[in-house]
Image (tube, helix red, strand yellow):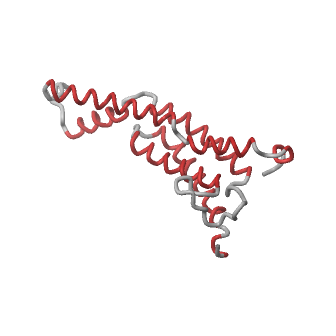
Amino acid sequence: MSADDGGLAALQIPYLLGIALSLSSYLPAFAPAPRQTFALLRKLDHAFASLLEGRDVGTGERLPGIEEGGGGGMSRTDMVRCKSLVEQTRVVVVEVMGGGGGDEEEEDEGEEERGGGDKDGDDVDMGEEGEGRREEDDDDQESVHSMDVARVYEKTIVRIDEMLNRGTAYDVGGSG
């Protein structure tokens, strides 16, 4: 490990916490975009869980800047901040995505802007066969998205709870 690696985790943690806070703050202001939102949340979950472990949770490789045997790269203060942010984000995601049909609303709005419907508000007839497939696809998407809502920051929550509960008595009341 080179001397240049020493501050890497110390720089990544506040940066990632800032990104996660921005996402949580801005999410309610925009129309639901489940696919993109859950993709970003999975990446943040991977990053936080890896920083907590000190290893990439996917590959098991030690992260640069974290000493061998030193545990994860987060201080207790960072862990508490991260846990609060993760819990807040989970609530926001449930509220934003809970309305269901986020993709459907996006498609309908986009269709109106492009002039996909006629002026009376009636949709163009797609035929019975095409409509049946779309309803099945919408149902599949909704069930996938409801599972994604349940998995928001799943890896991070598990690891952060383990690490915070593992602390000693003097750590609990101390200033991380």
Q: Quadrant of residue 71?
A: bottom right
Place of residue 127 in the rendered image (x, y in percent of width and height, measured from the top left) = 13, 26
Place of residue 57 in the rendered image (x, y in percent of width and height, measured from the top left) = 56, 53
Viewed as shown, does residue 83 lie left or right of 100? right
Number of labels in the image equals 0
Q: Residue at horizontal 46%, vertical 29%?
A: 98
**Relative depth, front residue between 43 and 37:** 43
Q: Residue at horizontal 60%, vertical 52%?
A: 17
Place of residue 153 in the rendered image (x, y in percent of width and height, measured from the top left) = 55, 42
Task: State the quadrant of the N terminus.
Answer: bottom right
Please say if 10 is above or below 29: below
**Relative depth, front residue between 60 and 156:** 60
Q: Residue furthest right?
A: 170
Q: Quadrant of residue 107?
A: top left
Viewed as shown, does residue 52 lie left or right of 142? right
Q: Residue at horizontal 86%, vertical 47%?
A: 170
Q: Residue at horizontal 61%, vertical 66%?
A: 64
Place of residue 115 in the rendered image (x, y in percent of width and height, measured from the top left) = 18, 37
**Relative depth, front residue between 145 and 50:** 50
